[in-house]
Image (tube, rainbow, N blue to C red):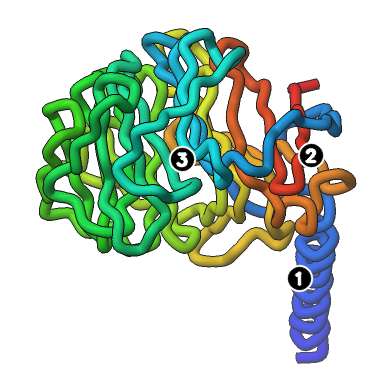
Amino acid sequence: MKRKTKRLLFIAVFIAIIAAAALIFVYFGKGNAPTVGGGTVSYKWENIKLSSDPKITSIEYAPLTPSVAVRARKDGERISYSTDGGTTWTKIKNLPVLDNGGSVAVSADGSAFIWCSPAFDARPYITENFGETWYQCQGLGFGSKVVADKVNPNKFYAVCNGIFYTSTDGGFYFDETDKDVSVDAIPFTVSGRENSIWFISNGTVMYTENSGKTFTVLDNFSASVIGFGAPETNGAYPTVYAIGKEFLNGQVNVDGTGVYRSTDKGATWKAIGDKSQLNDSVLSGAATISGDSAVFGNVKITLKNGDGFEGKPN
């Protein structure tokens, strides 16, 4: 009996030691690497000064005709366009409403502009002759957010009152889909990918690759800003860059807000940020993130105060 008791006591102590070791490993391991997802990629980040104009509220280029661009400003210039890649700008004098700022969208070939005025009672307007004449976009209401397909000049997309809309006639008429997003959803289109639209809504990230017929909602990530860059391999889906938080089984990564990239449409994420430079305080002021369209891995972050960061893999 004594021998049996000693054996049981020895087993109990051994199990306790193993359990304690496991807890110590888990506890100290959290401080050394992300606890979820695809791990980290070593990056070198450089602080840069951007020549951005704080009065510009929106600027877009035509991907198929990059010499054409349009911008909105919150001053007397209001809306202007460029046909030389942004070197010079021409103010549009004939506006449908006399508002400043707002957002703009440019068709893929630069043949049409859509302007969404910031006024609460203004609907989007479209022009096909550099602002000589404007037409109200049919089918959309107040407060619409409009983006252009990056491949097909005839396609535009919009979010209005939580409903997703599509246009296939160059932006003149928008059809309501049966897909609800949210009132606060912000749409983003993807270079080189027709029918591909991503959304951020109060942190939730979702996307469609068929103009809204079906949606994929990411349950492993919450983002404040997203952007796109060159794919890891030629012909693959563009790399997705994001500032946000990663989740696993509903639990947020203990590392907090960070910079991430995904090469598989958000199925997995790799942390690429440097907490010594890109801490939560800095990233809370991020305005945009965008990857290099030609070089995989290179990425730029712009801040609302005019500063920015450029990152490259080590």
The tag on residue 266 is: 3
Residue 229 as seen in the image, left or right of residue 45:
left
Relative placement, left or right, of 57 versus 199 is right
Residue 19 at x, y = what percent?
76, 70
The residue at the point 40 percent across, 37 percent down is 104
Q: Quadrant of the C terminus?
A: top right
Give the mark, 2 or 1, whose residue is nearer the N terminus. 1
From where the camera sits, is residue 147 visible? no
Q: Secondary structure at mark 2?
A: strand
Reading the image, the residue beneath label 2 is 307
Disc 2 residue type?
Asp
Q: Marks 3/1: CA distance? A: 35 Å
User: Which residue is label 1 attached to?
Assistant: 19
Considering every residue shown, the one lying at the far front of the view is 93
Of discs 3 and 1, which sits in the foreground? 3
Q: Residue at horizontal 71%, vertical 44%?
A: 303
- Whichever of callouts 3 and 2 sits on the residue coming sooner in the sequence is 3
Secondary structure beneath label 3: loop
